[in-house]
Image (cartoon, coloured by chain):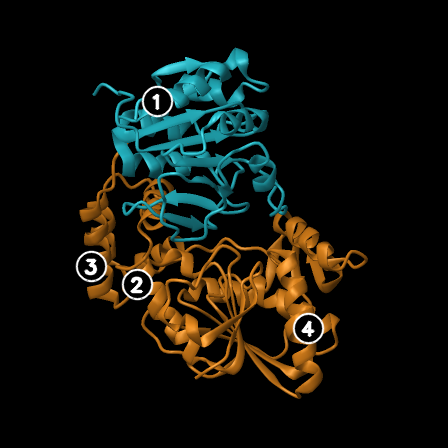
Amino acid sequence: MKNSIKNIEAIVIGGSAGSFPIICAILEALPHDFNIPILLSLHRLKNIRHGFKEALSIKSKNKVLEPSDKHKIKQNEILLAPSNYHMYIELNKSISLSTEEVINNSRPSIDLTFDSASYVYKSKLLAILLSGANKDGALGMYNAHKRGSYTIVQDPLDCTIDTMTKSALSLTEVNEILNVNEIKQLILSLYKGK
Amino acid sequence: MTEIELKDIKKITDVINSRYGIDFGNYALSSFKRRIKRIMDLQNIKSVDSIINNLETSTLYFKEFLSEITVNVTEMFRDPTFWLALRDDILIPLLNNRDEIRIWHAGCSSGEEVYSMAILLNVIGKQNKVTIYASDIDEKIINKAKNKTYSNKNMELNASNFNEIYPDDNLLNYFQEKDEKFTLKEEFTQNITFKKHNLVSDDAFSKFDIILCRNVLIYFNQQLQNNVLKKLTSGLFKGGVLCIGSKESLIWCEDINQYQEINREEKIFRKIQD
C-alpha cells in the first residue's frame, strides 16, 4: 500500500516533552478557516485540568477544545485530549474518552489515539509525532503506517528530546522525517490544496 | 498486527449475552476493542476464536474476562476540585438540614471513590448521618473493594489528591499499614453496603439523595448512556444530586430537562422534576 497525502480528512499530532512550542507554532500558522480537524494527544500534568488548553489557544486563530465524551468531530476543530483521559476516535467520527490503565506511563496515550484514529480514517489520516521523552506513540505510528495513513516524524536532530521520535523510527517506516518548519508548511499545503 | 474486526466483537458480545445474560452490545466500541486486545496480550491468546471458545466452555474464564473487560482503574479523590465543590455546595448544606441521607456509587470498581466519600464525611463529622450503597457488575472487584486495601504505589497518588483538599492532613492516617499495603481503618467503613448490580440491565434498586456515576457512562455508546441515565434519574429523589465524570455530558440524554446544572465544571446536577 502506498501511503499518500491526498484527501486528508483528519490530522492527529502526538507529542510530549519539547513539543509544546512546536504545537503553538503550528496552530499559530493555521488560517482561521482551516477545515481539517486536528486531534492533539499530548502528554500533560494529570492533576492540572486548566491552563494547557488556554496556553495553546493564545496564538491560535482557532479555538482549542477539550472535547467531552461522544463529541462529534467537526471540520474546523482543534481537539485536545483532556488531562487524565485517553482519547479514542469512534467509527462515527466522534470522540470517546476513557480512564483505562496508563500506557507508557501516559494518559492520554498517543499510541491509543493514533491507533483508533488510523482505524477510522485509514489513508485519509495524517499522523505526526513530535519531540518527547518516552516511547509512547511508536506503536501508534506503526499501526497508522500499516493502515495507510500518511506518517511524519519530527527529525530527531530537530527535537528537544529525541527519545519518542527515535523509538518510532526504530519500529516503523514513515513517509517523511521533517523539521518543524517543514511540518508547518506541509500542513498549510493541505489548506491551499482545498 | 492482528486487526480485531467488528464482526469479531459482535461474536464475542453475542456469546456473552446468550450464555451469561450480560449485554455488552452497546459498549463504546474503541475501548471495548482495545480491552479485547489487552486480554489477548495478557493471556497470550492468538485469536478471537479462542476467546469465544473459552467463553463458551468456562464460567470461571468468563469471570476473569469480566474483570478485565470492565475498566477498574480509579483513584481516591480523583479531581480534587470536584470533591471540594461536593463538600461545600452539596454535602455540608444538605447534612446541616437533614438527619439522614442516602448515597449511591454506581459502578464503584475497587472502592476508591466510596472510601473517599466515607473519609470526607468523617472529616466533616457527618458520617453517622449517611448510608452509602456501592454497586458494580463485577463480583471480583466488589470483593476487592470490600477488602479496602490498597498498594503503596497507588496510595501516593491518593494521598496527593487528598492534600489538594486538606493540605494539612495526611490520608495515610486513615489507614493501617502492613507489608507495604494500606488498609482503611474499620471506623471509616461503617454504613457502607456493597451490591452486585448491572447498570445496563438492572433497574435502580432504591431512591437516593446523591448518586455518583463518574467515568462509567464513557464506556457506553450514546443510546446506552441515555438508557442508563433514565435509571439513575428514577433512582434519585426530587431535589437529589447526580455527579458524573468531568468530561461526561448529559446533553444527548432525554432526561436532561429534569436536571438543573449546579456546577458546570465539576458536572454536578440537581434533579428538579419527577
What shade has chain A been given?
Answer: cyan
Which of disc 2 and disc 4 is earlier in sequence? 4
Disc 1 from disc 3: Cα separation: 48 Å
Disc 4 from disc 1: Cα separation: 59 Å
User: Do marks 3 and 4 share a subunit?
Assistant: yes
Q: Are marks 3 and 2 in contact (CB under 8 Å)?
A: no
User: Do marks 4 and 1 share a subunit?
Assistant: no
Classify the position of the N terminus of chain A by image quarter.
top left
Looking at numbered disc 2 in the image, what kind of residue is underneath it? Gln
Residue B113 drawn at (x, y percent): 57, 63
Looking at numbered disc 3 in the image, what kind of residue is underneath it? Asp
User: Do marks 1 and 3 share a subunit?
Assistant: no
| Circle 3 residue | B14
Q: Are marks 4 and 1 in contact (CB under 8 Å)?
A: no
Q: Look at the image and tell me whether residue A168 can be seen.
A: yes
| Circle 1 residue | A192
> Between B13 and B19, which is closer to the camera in this rendering?
B13
Disc 1 from disc 2: Cα separation: 39 Å
Q: Bin the neighbour count of mark 3 within 10 Å (Cα to Cα): few under 14, some 14-19, many 20 and up.
A: some
Disc 3 from disc 4: Cα separation: 43 Å
Q: Residue at x 39, y 73 (%)?
A: B255
| Circle 2 residue | B223
Question: At numbered mark 4, what does the secondary structure look like: helix, strand or loop?
Answer: helix
The image quarter containing residue A35 is: top left
Residue B58 drawn at (x, y percent): 26, 59
Q: Are marks 1 and 2 in contact (CB under 8 Å)?
A: no
Residue B74 drawn at (x, y percent): 53, 55
